[in-house]
Image (cartoon, rainbow, N blue to C red):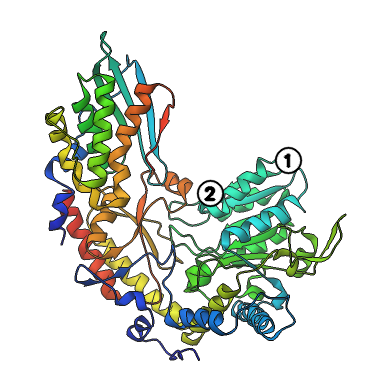
Amino acid sequence: MFDDLRDLYQEVILDHGRKPRNFRRLEDADRSARGDNPMCGDRMELFVKLAPDGSIADAAFQGRGCAISMASASLMTETVKGKSPAEAHMLGDRFRNLAMTGTCPECGAELEEEMERLQPLSGVHEFPSRVKCATLAWHTLNAALDGGAKEATSE
Amino acid sequence: MNAPVQPGFDVERIRADFPVLAQQHRGRPLVFLDSGASAQKPRQVIQAMVRSMEERYANVHRGAYRLSEAATADYEAARTAVARFINAADPREVIFTTNSTAAINLVAHGWGRGVLQPGQAVLISEMEHHANLVPWHMLRDDNRGIELRICRVTDAGELDLGDLEAKLADGKVGLVAVTHMSNVLGTVTPAARIVAMAHAKGAKVLLDGSQAAVHRRVDMQALGADFYAFTGHKLYGPTGIGVLWARLEHQERMPPFLGGGDMIASVTLEGSTWAEPPAKFEAGTPPIVEAVGLHAAIDYVSAIGMPALEAHERTLVDHAMRRLSDIEGLTLLGRAQDRGGVFSFALDNAHPHDLATLLDRAGIAVRAGRHCAEPLHARFGLEGGTCRASFGLYTTEGEIDYLAEALTKAREFFA
C-alpha cells in the first residue's frame, strides 16, 4: 500500500527520525534559537557552539515533530559541524532548493559531500505540504547564527 | 429544476450526488474522511447556485426591478428554510453571517461587549475549538472586567457537569458558550441540561453547533438556548455562509457588530439609526448565492431526513469504534457515551503528519494536527496532535474498513 513512499521515508530518514543524533541541550551554547511551525505543532530548540575561529564547533537540538522534521534537524546538526556560518547559510539555501525542487543545479563540487548527506530528504519536494517540515531546522539555524530573530518558522 | 432527492437512505445513491466522490486517487476511489473540516457538495447545491447566478441574480433589498426582487425572495426563502430546519419560532431569529466564527464573534461583540457588565463572567469549556475560544480571550483581555471561566472535560472526553455547576454557583456567569458537539472528541454535549443549569443561575447560553447541526436534528424550541451558531459548508452547503440563531429580545439588546449598508433605518451625516433585527446584524451585501446554496443543502438533507442520517451515522460510529479499537498501538481520543462521527487518534510510533501523508498515499483524506483545538490536545497529553477521521452522509462502512487496514499497515511501515 505504501511502497512508493519509500522515496520520502527512506531508511535513513526513518532512522534519524526515530533516533535523532545530537538530540540534546548544549549548556554552553554561544547561539540558540527556537523553531516553531504552529500549524503542525513541530517545535525545536537549536544550540550552536562556536570555535575561536568562528566556525561551528558543535550543534545540537531538542524538540518534537514529525519524522521529516526530526530527521532533517538531525542530519543538519551532523552536516554543519566544522562549517563557517557563511558555509552553513549556503548549505541552507541549497537544501531549501533541494527540498522544493528535488534537485540542486547550482550545487557544484564545493560542499558536494555535505549535499549528498542531505540528499535523502529531497523526496519531500513531491509533498508540498511537507516541505516546511524539512526546512524548519535550517530556518532555525539561520535565526541562531544571525542572532536577530530568536524564533523561526517555515510555515 | 434541481435534481430530486430520493427519500430513504441509500448510501450509493447519495454518493452519486457528489461529483467529487467519483475521483480516482492512484487508481483507487477517493476516501474522504475530513467532512468535519468541510463537507463535500452534492450536485443539487452546485446546480442551485449556478441557477441563482445564471437566472435570478442581483443585489438584494435594493432594486425595484424583477431580478432584484427574485434574488431578495430567494435570500429570504433561505432564511425561512433555515428557521424551519432548526425549528426556530420565527425566521427573524436567523441572522446570516459568513461562518460559525463570525456568528460567535457577533455574540462576543454584541452580548459580550454590549450587554455583559464588569464583574460578570463568560464560561466556556476545555473542548472548544479556537472559534469559541479566541473571541472570549479577546473579550477578557479588553479591560472591560469580564472574567473567563473554563469548564473541565473528564478523561472520557465529556463535559464535567459538576465543574460546570461549581463555576455557575456564584451567579456571576452571564453567558455560557459551549460546543454542542466536539470537533475532536465527537462528544455530543447534553445541551438541554446545560441550558437548564445555566438559566437557573441567570446565565444565557450560546451553543456552538458547527458540528452538531450536521449530525443531529437540532431544535431551537426544544433546546431552549439563547444563541446557536453553525456554518453552511459543513452541512454540504457552500463556504461563506453561516448562521447565528438568536432570540429576538436578545437581538434588540445587542448593538450592531459591523456598520454599513442594509443594517440602517436612516443615515444622516451626523449619525444612523439601526434597522430592525435581523437586518441590523447583516451589514453590506450579504452572501446571496451562498444563501441559495445553503437552502439547497438544507432541502437535500431534509429530503433524506435527519433521523435517517442519524441512524446511518450511528451505524458508522459503532463500526468505527469496533474497527479502530482493534488496532494495536492506536489511541482513540475521547470515549463519550453520546458521540458523533468524529474520531481523533494517535498511532504510537507515527507522528500525525507522517501518518496523514501515508493515508493520503492510500487515497484517504484525514486531517492531521490539532484541529483548531490546541488546549484540548494538551489536556490529553497529545501536544503533537492527532489524526482525525470525520464522517459525512456519504461515508461507508467499507471506507472505515479500508482506513483500519491502512492504519495497521502504517504501523508496520513505521515499526
Q: Which amino acid does label 1 sit on?
A: Gly
Q: Position of residue B384 (x, y in %)?
A: 36, 44
Q: Distance between the residues labelled 2 and 1?
A: 23 Å
Neighbourhood count class around disc 2 (C-alpha, 10 Å): few under 14, some 14–19, many 20 upward: some
Q: Going by the image, does B283 lie left or right of A83?
A: right
Q: Is residue A137 above or below residue A30?
A: below
Q: Going by the image, does A22 lie left or right of B217?
A: left
Q: In the rendered image, which quarter is residue B406 located in? A: bottom left
Between residue A7 and residue A26, name the one nearer to us: A7
Neighbourhood count class around disc 1 (C-alpha, 10 Å): few under 14, some 14–19, many 20 upward: some
Farthest top residue in view: A52
Same subunit, tags 2 and 1: yes
Residue at screen point 42% across, 48% down: B377
Q: Where is residue B363 in the image (x, y as percent from the top left)?
A: 25, 65
Q: Mark 1 belongs to which subunit?
A: B
Q: Position of residue A12 (x, y in %)?
A: 13, 40
Q: Where is residue B75 in the image (x, y as percent from the top left)?
A: 64, 78
Q: Is residue B16 visible?
A: yes
Residue at screen point 20% across, 36% down: A106
Q: Can you identify the residue that label 1 sits on? A: B145
Q: Is residue B306 visible?
A: no
* Sooner in the amino-acid sequence: mark 2 or mark 1: 1
Instruction: Specify the label residue B269 is tagged with.
Output: none
Q: Going by the image, does B64 lie left or right of B399?
A: right
Q: Which amino acid does label 2 sit on?
A: Arg
Task: Give yes or no for contact between labels 2 and 1 (Cβ–Cβ under 8 Å).
Answer: no
Q: Is residue B402 above or below residue A51?
A: below
Residue at screen point 71% across, 84% down: B65
Q: In this view, does B398 lie above or below B351?
A: below
Q: Mark 2 belongs to which subunit?
A: B
Q: Can you identify the residue that label 2 sits on? A: B152
Q: Is mark 2 on a helix, strand or loop?
A: loop
